[in-house]
Image (cartoon, rainbow, N blue to C red):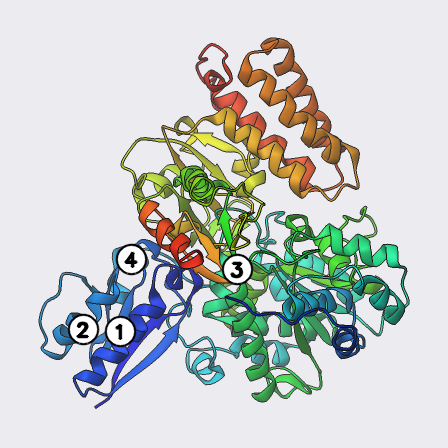
Amino acid sequence: MKLRVFVPCDAGAVAVGADLVARALAEAARSRDVALDIVRTGSRGLYWLEPMVEIETAAGRVAYGPMGQCDAANVLDATLGHGAHALRLGMAEEIPWLKRQTRLTFARCGVVDPRSLDDFRAHAGCRGLAQAVTLGPEATIEQVVQSGLRGRGGAGFPTGIKWRTVAQAQDPQKYIVCNADEGDSGTFADRMIMEGDPFVLIEGMAIAGFAVGATKGYVYIRSEYPHAIATMQAACAAARRGGLLGRNIAGSSHDFDIEVRAGAGAYVCGEETSLLESLEGKRGIVRAKPPLPAHHGLFGKPTVINNVLSFASVPIILEKGAAFYKDFGMGKSHGTMPIQLAGNVKHGGLFETAFGVTLGELVDDIGGGTLTGRPVRAVQVGGPLGAYFPRALFDTPFDYEAFAARDGLIGHGGIVVFDDRVNMAKQARFAMEFCAIESCGKCTPCRIGSTRGVETVDRIITGENREANLEVLRDLCNTMKFGSLCALGGFTPYPVMSALTHFPEDFGAAPKRLEAAE
Amino acid sequence: MPAYEPWNVERANALIAEHAGREGPLLPILHAFQEEFGYVDAAAEPLIAQALNISRAEVHGVVTFYHDFRRALAGRHVLKLCRAEACQAAGGDEIAARAEQQLGTAMGRTTADGSVTLEPVYCLGLCATAPSAMLDGRVHGRLDDKRLDALLREARP
């Protein structure tokens, strides 16, 4: 009998030795004359347990982790001898951290072989596309509208409305563009999907192509993600061979193909119009809107541009119906959000759950507090352009509107945890510095404001005319917020102002009690 | 350690021809140059401009806009350290300072012996196994002094 062993090939697992563990397992099996079938999967997203290896048994998959190279032989022996092992975590699906999640978008991630279309089909893949073909383009868009799905890239614009606009545009050439330029620190959900379940993204884009009448799609992946680029390329080739891409997809009369393109290290290219410029082969300079990409997008053609998670959420909406998806969540935030816990956190990883969970639950309960064991002082939610939240605001529910009401944003769903050694003035300075490094240079508030911002924070830190410079900083943030063309300059004030508002003592001001949270 | 071809015009033209027919071919061409030669030679700009029927200024503008494209060869090894927030929260500042001190060079520079180029990177998406780094395209997470020193020894035996 051949023993099946699942070892992640996700970059996060590889970074902590998954390849070495796979090699050690193969060697240990050889020396014991055991037939071993090593399947490389994506990650389940329980990163503090990575590399997490799963071994198939009659009852299901048994997980072990975090595995080191030297554990391979004795884990294999324990499995063969039915013995206990210190790293044994029990059945993978029963691990509480995984079990309490609602995995819709990430249902297959960490389970299937990301390079096998057959495995994807065997795990309920391609059903959404089949349903879309049955429904026809208009009803497909209606399902996406009804589901309440909002853009998961950060802006939260209703996906179905975007699609409808492109469907109504008259042009023989339309495009589907996937924004996989996941540059926000603390986020890795796009990377995990592309490395762990790339076919769900391909299926989602194919559904979009079918629905709006586009024949060509691009996935623009940042160059910092070489593993995701390689997996997506392999998956596209497999999808072409298997009829998921190419002519007459899924038995329809519609043709659709996808090309993978690599970015070149510019953060601003995560902004949709800058991304389109980059795909066209230009500097990633932001375009003024309107015209919207839906009317005038890639090469001037009507274009659906969505984040990886938005496309990846579409197949299950089509498969199970809009109502099924819409029932999850709260207020105007429907469905589930893949939340990413990162930084100085004990249980870091991907936690997909319905909107509405509070920040405190996420950080203290699910995340387990800091890895260093020190008190949590601040968390940054939504990437480098997201606000810093103090413990006093930990009752904020994870919801687009609730975060906006507290001068924050959920962005792409990343939460970076800091312990009590963090200096918030330094973090505010970094936000300005990052904006200065990454600004595309088109609009003045962002290009000049970010550099002036760094200088002003420096003066505040050294105590030079502190009160006057604090006023300059507030004024500058206001100018950037309302005067910038895109979210880079427009949202940099969020981390800066939240640091200043909630942690004034770090800026040399007298400690101030947080005013009523509203 | 990556091995690169020395710059040569015939090979450059072949690479341009390979990609010129694609939609938006400029970034794929520049990536191909960087993979082949390790950098984008200044002499490449007029060749590309000619082939794509755009101005040299446009090509130059694109080459200089993106952080990835090098205008000269890097050191024999490239060590990218993540300097973004998640890695800062997990001790990335100390790791970066140690790397600079051990290598005797500053972030963004190459060591005097040409062995290592040390670069900042703003997020490798390894934020739950921070601090993270990439050495010659291979990823490393949960860096501490010991693991960093091992990477530095690998780059400078």
Q: Pointer 4: what residue?
A: A49
Asked whether the residues under the numbered discs 1 and 2 touch, taking CB atoms below 8 Å apart as contact, a structural biologist would say yes
**Residue A259: percent from left, percent from top:** 67, 73
The reply to the same-chain question for discs 1 and 2 is yes
Element on which disc 4 rests: helix
Tell me the number on the disc at residue A190.
3
x 41%, y 42%: residue: B95
How many numbered marks appear? 4
Please, which residue is most extreme toward the front here?
Answer: B113
Tell me the number on the disc at residue A73.
2
x 48%, y 23%: residue: A502
Q: Is residue A337 above or below residue A405?
A: below
Q: Earlier in the sequence, mark 2 or mark 4?
A: 4
Element on which disc 2 rests: helix
> Where is the N terminus of chain A found, in terms of image quarters?
bottom left
Q: Quadrant of residue A461?
A: top right
Q: Earlier in the sequence, mark 3 or mark 4?
A: 4
- Mark 2 or 4: in front is 2
x 48%, y 47%: residue: A186
Q: Pointer 1: what residue?
A: A24
- Mark 1 or 4: in front is 1
Host chain of mark 1: A
The answer to whether residue A351 is visible is no
Host chain of mark 4: A
Q: Could you tell me how far apart the alpha carbons at marks 3 and 4 are, in whole angstroms?
A: 20 Å
